[in-house]
Amino acid sequence: MTNDFKIPLVDLIRKYSRRWLVETEISEHIDFFHLNRNSSGIVIKVDFDLTMTILAHNIYRLFCSGFKGYSHCGAQAIFDKFISAPGQIFIDDGSILVKLKRKRTLPILLEQTDAYRELSYPWLDDYSIRFAADSTT
């Protein structure tokens, strides 16, 4: 692990645990966000792909930061438990209703979206968005 034999064991473990977290994040970028599949050899395109990968990773982290018990999940687990959720979309006068199929983590998602129930979005012609559980699984 090291050739620094004077470093205290506690400091050595802390140093390498931080390195492990960094390596885990890089592994997640490669596996889930397909960082190793850059679409071009042009430097500008590679920089853009890297930036978008890091942005997507941070959005996933921000998305689940308020979910009790799920804030430290990896991107694949977040996708499986929350993002990959089939449902139906209904558009009425001034509102959009998203009915999601029932799954175990749906109550957590619905609890978090209640805070945004009264908001309207200018980029959606001031429509409001509501999320609800569908009656079927």
Image: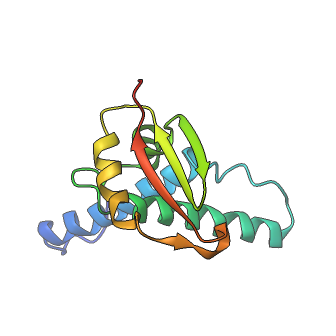
Q: Quadrant of residue 133?
A: top left
Nearer to me, 131 or 92: 92
Q: Residue at x 12, y 68 (%)?
A: 10
Outermost residue on the front side: it is 93
Outermost residue on the top side: it is 137
Residue 77: horizontal and vertical position, in percent? 40, 42
Please, is residue 110 above or below residue 127 in the view? above
Residue 134: horizontal and vertical position, in percent? 42, 33
Nearer to me, 99 or 37: 99
Q: Residue at x 51, y 46 (%)?
A: 98
Nearer to me, 51 or 71: 71
Q: Please say whether residue 20 is visible from this viewpoint.
A: no
Q: Quadrant of residue 113?
A: bottom left
129 to the left or right of 134: right
Residue 16: horizontal and vertical position, in percent? 29, 63
Q: Residue at x 34, y 50 (%)?
A: 110
89 to the left or right of 66: right
Q: Residue at x 65, y 65 (%)?
A: 52
Q: Quadrant of the C terminus?
A: top left
Q: Quadrant of the N terminus?
A: bottom left
Q: Quadrant of residue 102?
A: top left
Residue 56: horizontal and vertical position, in percent? 56, 61
